[in-house]
Image: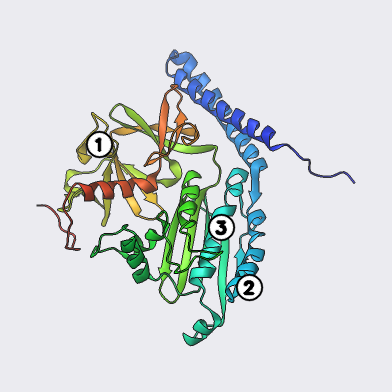
Amino acid sequence: QVSPSIRVDLDKVDRLVNMVGELVITQAMLKALVDQLPTEYATRVAREIEELSHHTRDLQDSVMAVRAQPVKTVFQRVPRLVRQLAAETGKQVRLVTAGENTEIDKTVIEQLGDPLTHMIRNAIDHGIESPEDRIAVGKQPEGTICLSAEHRGGRIVIRIDDDGRGINRERVVEKAIEKGLVAPGATLSDEEIDNLIFAPGFSTASTVSAISGRGVGMDVVKRNIQQLGGRVFIISKPGEGTTFMLTLPLTLAVLDGMIVSVGRETYVLPLANVIESLRPNEADIYRVVSGGEILLLRGEYVPLVPLYKLFHVRGGVDEPAGGVVVVVETEDSGKVGLLVDGLVGQQQVVIKSLEPNYDPVPGIAAATILGNGRVALILDVSSLREMSVARARAARPAITSGVLEFAS
């Protein structure tokens, strides 16, 4: 019987992906040259380039499908790990998996193993209680860990849920103060406390064991996921359990982007994050006493993040009413309005990672080459809001009131 599949060396597939990427860049350059042609030729050439664009996208989708693999290959390692850790800790743990056939780029899958291992270890050692403790609080003696994967909004979302004790926030703050990560008496939100566990060298374990206590693990998880262009979020309810949620790009090669201008600079916003763009009215802009501005958009207040200020770009539009606000959806901060000078256009862009050639840059996910041959930076929309808040805090004294006030 003839086999319906063949083995192909991964390097050959990678070369094919790179060739498709170069084809996308060349196509964008051809599109940019059309505007310089006489009118009688421009229309016909534009039509043919549009046809080429369709074929290129089909080719790209086919190549990415060759690289795609189900996350089952990573999930299959977890049951043995859970059994081993349950035996070492004397706990009863049941593993439930879902979405094992969800497909993701092979490069992403290869780097998922270590982060998942760390989070499963964390869930069993710190989250799931001993059978005696669970019975004492009215729970079943057997704890449950749910591992699931799904496609959502052009990304893959992987969740690790446990029904354990949740994050002991008092203990986390106590350890953070002890290590000098937090000033004594500082007021932190639950979200800020939960995110302290990602600090380098942080651990709440009282003793060092083979499983935990060294302070190495969760900071590595966050760094590895961010290098893949992903994010990590925590949702924890004391006594009920904790959820770790990873959001990752489906592929590391090509994305649809919206190109925006700020001063003399050009940036790319992932189209999957863009909700809408608008020119705001001055009457809808409110200045907050604690710093910054917000936009009233159909009854909803959206924080504004001026990109020229965030990246120190000269010549950028500094008044929201004089520029364009691009409303984007972030994974953790909801909607954010990015203030830019104008919209340049929309196109497929080839992702060129910064890390191998430079260092990680806050707010920047990667770079690309545009149709005019210039390099443009691809923005990490989820970190822009964090950068804006951190910048505002650094520029003003601490605010003690939690009430939202508007400047008159």
Look at 46% across and 48% down and name the residue there: 223
Q: Position of residue 57 (x, y in %)?
A: 58, 35
The disc label shown at residue 87, or none: 2
How is the rendered protein coloured? rainbow
**Residue annotated with mark 3:** 116
Q: Quadrant of residue 240?
A: bottom left
| SS at circle 3 | helix
Disc 1 to disc 2, how far (Cα)?
Answer: 60 Å
Lower position in the chain sequence, tag 2 or tag 3: 2
Disc 2 to disc 3, how far (Cα)?
Answer: 19 Å
Look at 62% across and 45% down and name the residue there: 106
In this picture, residue 49 sits left or right of residue 360: right
Specify whether residue 346 is in view: yes
Q: Nearer the viewer, mark 3 or mark 1?
A: 3
Q: Position of residue 209 (x, y in %)?
A: 53, 66
The disc label shown at residue 323, or none: 1
355 above or below 244? above
140 above or below 250? below
Q: Quadrant of residue 345?
A: top left
Disc 3 to disc 1, how far (Cα)?
Answer: 43 Å
* Amino acid on which disc 2 is placed: Ala
Q: Residue furthest top?
A: 38
Q: Quadrant of residue 98?
A: bottom right
Q: Badge 1, how many Cα within 10 Å: few under 14, some, many 20+?
A: many
Look at 25% across and 46% down and name the residue there: 391
